[in-house]
Amino acid sequence: MRHLILPGQVENSVNALTTLFVEFGAELPLSLMSQYVPVLPHELADLNRPLTAEEFEQVYSHALDLGFRHLFVQFPADNAADRKPPFLPDFRLEKPFSSPPDED
């Protein structure tokens, strides 16, 4: 099961992981993902920023406390907060999937 942790939504993630554990048990393979990157403005202010290390740690700690045995984890340190999304088509262009020019 893949779970993307969203900024400002720790309680949602904690509840989702608890439900998954109750329904499927400790043997469910669980992937915790931290790579959320805001692309367009969102009306929920928290979704206009990256996930914090503290938010990630709360969700990760909860998964460990529940006892999931098969965790695949993308730690926030593995995903620089100031990075742009690695792939983002621009449909305003004639070739929306072409590589962007190098930025200096």
Image (cartoon, helix red, strand yellow):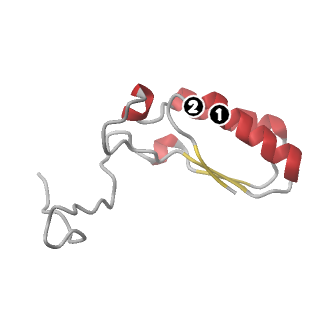
Q: Is residue 13 left or right of residue 94?
A: right
User: Residue 100 in the image: x percent, y percent?
Assistant: 17, 63
The residue sitting at 57% across, 31% down in the picture is 9
The relative height of residue 2 versus residue 42 in the rendered view (above or below) is: below
The relative height of residue 58 versus residue 30 in the rendered view (above or below) is: above
Distance of mark 2 from mark 1, alpha carbons?
5 Å
Which amino acid, mark 1?
Asn
Q: Are marks 2 and 1 in contact (CB under 8 Å)?
A: yes
Q: Return the residue nearer the eye: 32 or 21.
A: 21
Residue 40 occupies quadrant? top left
Question: Mark 2: few, some, or many residues within 10 Å (few <14, many ≥20)?
Answer: some
Residue 14 occupies quadrant? top right
Which amino acid, mark 2?
Gln
Question: Mark 1: few, some, or many residues within 10 Å (few <14, many ≥20)?
Answer: few
- Where residue 12 is drawn, which disc sits there? 1
Question: For mark 2, what is the residue?
Answer: 9
The relative height of residue 103 versus residue 99 in the rendered view (above or below) is: above
The relative height of residue 54 versus residue 32 in the rendered view (above or below) is: above
User: Residue 103 in the image: x percent, y percent?
Assistant: 13, 54
The residue sitting at 81% across, 34% down in the picture is 65
Label 2 element class: loop
The residue sitting at 52% across, 44% down in the picture is 34
